[in-house]
Image (tube, grey):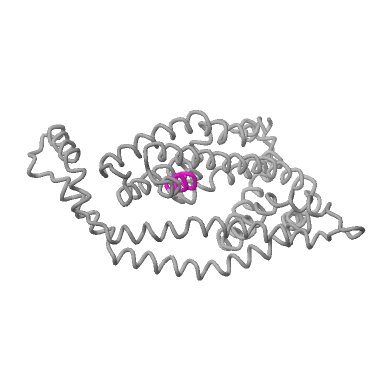
Amino acid sequence: MQITPQTVLKFLVGAVIAALALFVLWYFSSIVVYILVSAVLAVMGRPLVHRIEQLHIRRWKLPRALAAAITLVVIWALAAVFGLLFVPLVFDKVYQFANLDFAAVLQTVEQPVAQLQQYLAELFSMPVNQLSLHDALLDFMREWIDMDSVNRLFSSIVGLLMSSAVAIFSISFITFFFLKEDGLFYAMITAFFPERYSENITRALDQVTYLLSRYFRGILTESLLMMIAVTITMSAFGMKAADAAFIGLIMGIMNVIPYAGPLMGGVLSLFVGIVSPIEGQTIGYTMIVIICSLLALKSLDDFILQPTLYSERVKAHPLEVFIVILIAGSAAGVLGMLLAIPAYTVLRVFAKEFFSELSLVRKLTENI
């Protein structure tokens, strides 16, 4: 492609506009999150709105506003049921952590810890008396799992619940109108662009909606399968149904975060195993069961489910997706990793629509 002053100018103007747009999105990030969450809920709830709209009571047809309101109530009812089932379990485990006998816990894993200490001492040529994993673990657990830290956690949870009231109201209000008016979200986006680009914006939004719908459906399916698999596996080893379901829930939710999520979920699952070991077994045995089971299931997920989810569903190369997640994680931590794939998908679609003459853009978007 021949590079002309007009091409360079168009690219520079596009880059400036993109930078300004990103700054505005960052500055009003909370509002943007409300709108995006509402848009996702609207996409998920739209089929139910259409079904309710088709219902007739004699000759009276349900108005779309009523169908949207019923759908919104159903969405929040499902969220409330989910919370009522699992939130008490979370608070129960936190309370059990606060009253944990750390010394007794370490006694159950003293032998493997001693073996690991001996191995590390030999590996690094250190005297055994200079390396005490037992004392280090005990100090760590006393520092991070005590009543003060639990009280701080409860305080932060209460503060989060208070601040969430505004978010819940805002998301509910926006979602209702997105459900009630099909083209409202598109109209909000196209309003920021000149009218001559409305066709391009609409086409890009259609493609973004299609790709992200595939992605979110895949995420939900993968998390559900992981939750079921972990729950069944833990139950098969003799763990109580409530504890097995709780570990399954942790892994299902944390699996939404690429790569880092399952590691954090595994650590939380180990703490659950420490608090509620398999009946009739030691804490050490429970921890080994949890570690081996999660490694086996996560390997199956990594090699079978995730390649399909993270590459084929958003039509990007697996290495490309992996690099994007690493960059997002370095820039914005766990939140960046969570939003990396959706954000990159949006950028690719809009880049293809407006900058398809650039060879790099054509290469990155050839499968869209």
Start-end of magenta stretch = 247-254
Question: At 64% across and 34% down in the image, what residue appears?
Answer: 365
Residue 338 percent across, percent down from the top left: 51, 47
Establish if 313 lies above or below 176: above
Main secondary structure of the magenta stretch? helix
Establish if 368 lies above or below 187: above
Question: At 71% across and 62% down in the image, what residue appears?
Answer: 176
Quarter of the image with the C terminus in it: top right
Establish if 227 lies above or below 103: above
Residue 73 percent across, percent down from the top left: 67, 61
Establish if 48 lies above or below 154: above
- Position of 99 compared to 72: left or right? left
Residue 280 percent across, percent down from the top left: 28, 43
Q: Residue furthest right?
A: 59
- Position of 324 compared to 146: left or right? right
So how many labels did they put on this image? 0
Asked if residue 265 is among those painted magenta in the image, a careful observer would answer: no
Question: At 42% across and 45% down in the image, what residue appears?
Answer: 244
Quarter of the image with the N terminus in it: top right
Please state which of residues 293 and 235 is positioned toward the viewer in this rendering: 235
Please state which of residues 285 and 222 is positioned toward the viewer in this rendering: 285
Residue 125 percent across, percent down from the top left: 11, 34
Q: Residue furthest front?
A: 280
Q: Residue furthest top?
A: 303
